[in-house]
Amino acid sequence: MAAKRPSRPSSASSARPAARAAKAPAKTAAKGPGKAPAKMPRKVAAGTRPAATKSAKAKAPPALAQVVLAALEDMKAVNVKAMDVRGITDITDMMVVASGTSDRHVKSIADRVVQRCKEAGYRPLGVEGERDGEWVLLDLNDVVLHVMLPRVREFYALEKLWENGAARRA
């Protein structure tokens, strides 16, 4: 294709190598600083990785709880209530109770929470009640999630059970 281009005056062709020469140091300079920042984040990342890993392990339950609550919000779960039950029971750290508008909605909420938790690296220990869809229990070790239809939630009143237990212990 270069042969098909019209020829330019000699002054333009002499300016062209100068422009290339001017651009060449810029590219070299861009590569030079490009190498330095590439090395610096590696050093910074290498220095901070162990601390980040330790803090991530220490804060695993809150991160899991955030994943669960974000998934519930994404699926428009109704009347979500998260209760810290560490002082009440050794079973789990957090109990989350949410409602769905229909049995299909309850199932899809539970499925989305499982999906998001797996994406975040958390595997559920157990899922119960998905077939019926009236009450799905999802055990994530540090977080236990109950997704229920409103009538089932009202009948069992789990929030009152755990809140009253907290009131007696305190």
Image (cartoon, grey):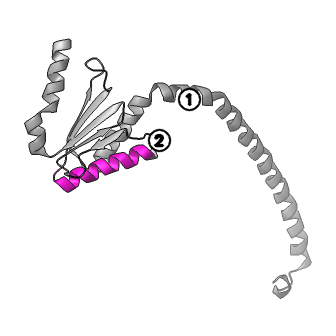
Q: Mark 1 points at which residue?
A: 52
Q: Tell me the mark number nearer the camera, choosing from 2 and 1.
A: 2
- Identify the residue at image location x=88%, y=80%: 9
Point out residue 7 in the picture as x, y percentages from the top left corner. Answer: 86, 84
Q: How crowded is mark 2: few (under 14 residues within 10 Å), some or many (20 or more)?
A: few
State the CA–CA distance, disc 2 to disc 1. Answer: 16 Å
Magenta highlight range: 101-118
The local secondary structure at tag 2 comes to loop
Residue 100 appears left or right of 3: left
Is disc 1 placed on a helix, strand or loop?
A: helix
Disc 2 or 1, which lies upstream in sequence? 1
The x, y position of residue 125, in whole percent, is 37, 38
What residue is pinned by disc 2? 121
Residue that appears at 84% across and 82% down: 2
Snapshot quadrant of residue 10: bottom right
Name which quarter of the figure residue 97 lies in: top left
Left or right: 106 in relation to 28: left
Does the magenta segment cover residue 84?
no
Residue 4 spot, x, y in % from top left: 82, 87
Q: Is residue 97 above or below residue 161?
A: below
- Residue 103: numbered disc: none
Q: Is 124 on the left or on the right of 44, as rendered?
A: left
Outermost residue on the top side: it is 170
Amino acid under disc 2: Gly
The answer to whether mark 2 and mark 1 are in CB contact below 8 A is: no
Magenta region, main secondary structure: helix
Seen at 12% across and 44% down, the residue is 150
